[in-house]
Amino acid sequence: MNDVSRSFRGNSNAARDIAHHLHPYTNFKKHEETGPLTIVRGRGIYVTDDDGKEYIEGMAGLWSAALGFSNERLATVAYEQMKQLPFYHAFNQRSHEPAINLAEKLKQMAPVEMSKVFFANSGSEANDTVVKMVWYMNNALGRPNKKKIVSRLKGYHGITVASGSLTGLPNNHRSFDLPIAGIIHTTTPHYYRGAQSGETEDQFTTRCAEELEALIVKEGGADHVAAMICEPVMGAGGVIVPPKGYYEKIQAVCRKYDMLFVADEVICGFGRTGNVWGSQTMNIKPDILTCAKALSASFLPISAVMVNDKVYQALADESNKIGVWGHGFTYSGHPVAAAVALEAQKIYDEIDLFGHARRMSPAFAKHIQSFADHPLVGEAMSVGMVGALEVVADKKTKAPFDMATVGAGNRVYNHAVARGLFIRNMGDRVAICPPLIINESELADLFGRLRQALDATLADLKSEGHFKG
Ligand SMILES: Cc1ncc(COP(=O)(O)O)c(C=O)c1O
C-alpha cells in the first residue's frame, strides 16, 4: 500500500513478519522487500514503533480510536468482565447483561426511534447482516423480487462478499469477482470532482438524485429495488462531504420507490462529524443504522445494526414462520467487547467527548482551510473532526498527477511518516481523522508536520520536473 523503507535483520520483527504474516490491504511482493512498520505501544494520540520512534496517529488508527491509544478504565472493565463471564453467546434466546445494557444504550442514543439492536464484530459483518435483513424482510412481506440494493461509487462498506459488493472502489472488486448480482452503484456526490462545468451545488445534487432515480427505474423500479446504503460522509473513498441538500433529494427518491434507507455510521458514528451521528449532521433519517469502530473506541472488535420497528416486525414474522432467524455470529454481543463498548460510551458522556469534538471542529476546519492556497492542494475539505486535502498537478484545471509515475499522495504519506505523523493517502487524497480527544496544541503539531510533509513533497516534485506550478 504505502512505501515505507525499513531495515530488518534475521530474527527481527520485520523479518518474522515477512516470513509469517499475511496483511490486509498490502502489496505482498512489496512487503517482502520493505517489511512492516511495527507498532509496540500507544499513549494518548501517539503510537510508538519498535525503534522507539513516536508518531501522532492522525488517522486514529483506522478512523476509529476515538479515545486514543491508552485508557486504564477500559482495560480494567475488560479484565473484570473476563473474570466474571469471559464469553457467552446470544443464540437461542441466551443473553447476558453487557449485551442487554449496550443495546439499551444504543437505542437511547439513536438519531431516530429504533426498535432493536443486533451485534456483530466488524463493520463488514454489520453491513453483510443488513443485506441479509433486507432480503429476508422482503421475503417476509411477500415481495420476493424486491432485493436490489443501491450503494455509491467510491462508497466503502467493508470487504466481505456482500459488504465488499456494496463498496464502490475498484480494488475491492478487481480479481475478487465482485460485486455480486443485485448490488448496484450510483453517482458519487463529490462536487469538486463530479460537477459539470458551470453546475451549481444545487444543480449537482439535483442531478445526483436524477441519476439515482434513472438507475432505480432501469433496474426495475419499486418492485425490484429494496434499499440504499450511504456513509453520511464518505470515508475511505476520500472523505467526501456531499453538498447541502443532497440527502434530502436522494431520500425523497428512496421514499418514492418504497426503499429502506441505511446509514453506515461505521466512521461517522460517535462524534466524528460534530454530532453523535453523521445522520444528524447530514439530515438523514435511517431505517437501519450500522456502527462499529468508535463504538468500543476500537479497544475490542464489536459492531451493531439498529433497525426500526417496520424492519423488526417483518423480520420477526419471517423468523416465526420459518422457526428461526438463521443468522448470527459466535461472538455477536461478546460480553467483554460489549462491556468495553458500554464503558467507552460512559467515558464519552463523562468527558463530553462529542461536545469536545464539536468545540474543536472550527480549529480543525481552520487548519484544513489553511492549506487551500498551498500550491499542491486542489481541494481542502472537512466536517467535524475528519478532513482531506486533494493533491493536484494544476490548481486551476484540477489536473491530477499521474498516479503510476508520480504517486504524489504516497509521497506526502512518506514525508509525513518520516516526520512522525500518520495520515492516510487514498490516491492523491490525503485524509486526517485524529483521535477525538486531541487538543488544540496537538492539533497544531499535527498540521505543522503535515505542512512540512506537503512542502517536502512539493520540493521533490519540482526538482524532478513533475510540478511546473
Ligand atoms: C464506512 C465503513 N463501513 C464499513 C467498514 C468496514 O468495517 P470493518 O473493517 O470493521 O469490517 C468501514 C471500514 O473502514 C467503513 O469505513
Image (spheres, grey):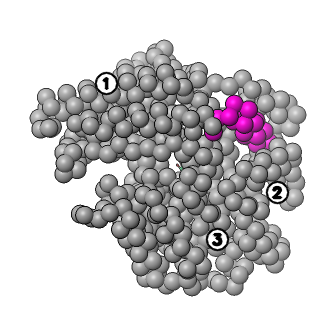
Residue 407 in the image: x percent, y percent?
26, 40
Q: Which mark is residue 452?
A: 1
Asked whether mark 2 lies closer than 8 Å to ligand 1, one says no
Q: Residue 170 in the image: x percent, y percent? A: 38, 57
Above or below: residue 259 compared with residue 447: below
Q: Main secondary structure of the magenta part?
A: helix
What distance separates the C-alpha of mark 3 from that of mark 2? Answer: 21 Å
Which quadrant is home to the N terminus?
top left
**Is residue 341 part of the magenta span, yes or no?**
yes
**Outermost top residue:** 52
Give the residues drawn in magenta, as a range: 335-354
Q: Is residue 13 left or right of residue 458?
A: right
Give the CA distance from mark 2 to mark 1: 53 Å
Residue 68 is situated, as x and y percent measured from the top left of the image, at 59, 29
Circle 1 — which element?
helix
Write down the residue under mark 2.
91
**Looking at the picture, does residue 257 appear above or below residue 384?**
below
* Sequence-first disc among 3 and 2: 2
Label 3 is placed on what type of residue?
A: Val
Q: Is residue 50 above or below residue 464?
A: above
Q: Are marks 1 and 3 in contact (CB under 8 Å)?
A: no
Disc 3 target residue: 134
Residue 234 horizontal side relative to residue 294, left or right: left
The answer to whether residue 300 is magenta is no
